[in-house]
Image: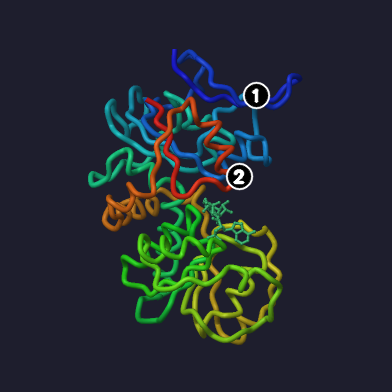
Amino acid sequence: MFKALVIDNDEQGYRTTLKDLEEKQLPDQDVTLEVSYSTLNYKDALAICNKGPIVRQFPMVPGIDFVGRVINSRHPQWQQDDVALLTGWGVGEKYWGGLAQKASVSGDWLVKVPTALSPLQTMAIGTAGFTAMLCVMALEKQGITPQHGPVLVTGASGGVGSFAVSLLARLGYEVVASSGRASDSDYLITTLGAASVIDRNELSQPGKPLAKERWAASIDSVGSHTLSNVLAGIKRDGVVAACGMAQGLDLPTSVAPFILRGVILVGVDSVMCPLPLRQQAWQRLADLVDGEQLQKLTRVIPLSAAREGAEQLLAGEVRGRLIVDCR
Ligand code: NDP
């Protein structure tokens, strides 16, 4: 028997409960792992609390990312006792996820944990840190370097935003953090390494198609009017990596930034990201992330408190990362 958070949706309604399951109830995938840690992402919280159409079949074990030890494998790449991590691929949405003591998944979805990272650190980074790294790599791929000038990060105190600020700062970029938490300026500057902070209200209202050129590049996890104002304020030939929709799914912009300033908008999707890019991003994270800083951003809760943690996350009461200890 093992414990798992299970979402049911039937005649008794939508409910999330901690259950005892038997191993034979796991999906028949080619690698079974003993999960050590998972995390609570915004998507997980929406699924657990029935606040968005995340889960596509029931019963579902939520948890879009996890790290664990292989206990059984029919996959050629994976042997017993290998330590592997998983993010995305529809796990926790379409396939059973990581908020459980055991998980069975396709070996094609797993990434070897870099030697420099502990399992706990891996999940402290999780989908948020991984997505931020993909965004940084997207800017680099378009030729952006610290010499090009300041880089704006929106949603800076959020999961993706915090990592984006910290990774860019460690790589030597001048980071401008846009945040709605004025009280977090000290955290954004002293802990994460931003050079300056702007109020997100400057960007969140409808604006002009083109504005003063301010930033060489941007990582945006907010979308909507914020992203259109970001595009309007990017310098000639600048680049924006867009990965989120915290303000909205819409993008009320014009072609002006693209055809008059050569701005490039790059979309970043961590869910279906191909394996070689995943491996590269995790190695970069292992090289760049500061273990001490990571610890400051992390709170560990037991699996039995995951539901409560999800509610706190949706209520905006969580800063940093909530790691779920599934052992
Ligand atoms: P968080 O909730 O941790 O952070 C989002 C941040 O956005 C908040 O902390 C806040 O930052 C800001 N924000 C929230 N609401 C608004 C608003 N109405 N207007 C402007 N800013 C707002 O989420 P994550 O960082 O985990 O995810 C951010 C986005 O990225 C989400 O939309 C998520 O779905 C998406 N995402 C996409 C991935 C991909 O593969 N493309 C992977 C992971 C996440 P502040 O208080 O500093 O203003």
Residue 76: percent from left, percent from top? 33, 32
- Give the mark nearer the N terminus: 2 vs 1: 1
Q: Secondary structure at mark 1?
A: strand
x and y, in percent, of residue 150 in the image: 43, 78
Q: Is residue 130 above or below residue 182?
A: above
CB of mark 1 near ligand 1 (< 8 Å): no
Circle 1 is placed at which residue position?
8
Q: Reply above or below: 297 against 233.
A: above
Label 2 packing within 10 angstroms: few (<14), some (14-19), many (20+)? few
- When asked about the image quadrant of residue 234, the answer is bottom right
In which quadrant of this rendering is ligand 1 seen?
bottom right
| Mark closer to the observer (2, 1) | 2
**Residue at 50% across, 55% down:** 158
Residue lying at 40% horizontally and 81% vertically, measured from the top left: 148
Q: Where is 36 relative to 88, above or below?
A: above
- Residue placed at 58% from the left, 86% from the top? 212
Q: Callout 1 environment at 10 Å: few (<14), some (14 to 19), or many (20+)?
A: some
Residue 297 at x, y = what percent?
Answer: 39, 49
Residue 215 picture location, percent across and down: 49, 79
Point out the residue furthest to the right here.
11
Front residue of this view, candidates 55 and 187: 187
Q: Residue at x 70, y 62 (%)?
A: 250
Q: Residue furthest front?
A: 183
Q: Amino acid at mark 1?
A: Asp
Is there any visible trace of residue 267 in the rendered image? Answer: no
Q: State yes or no: discs 2 and 1 in contact (Cβ < 8 Å).
A: no
- Picture disc at residue 315: 2
Q: How is the image coloured?
A: rainbow
- Choose top left, top right, bottom left or bottom right for residue 69: top left
Tell me the quarter of the image containing the N terminus: top left
Q: Identify which amino acid the numbered label 2 is placed on.
A: Ala
The answer, for residue 60, to whether it is visible in the render is yes
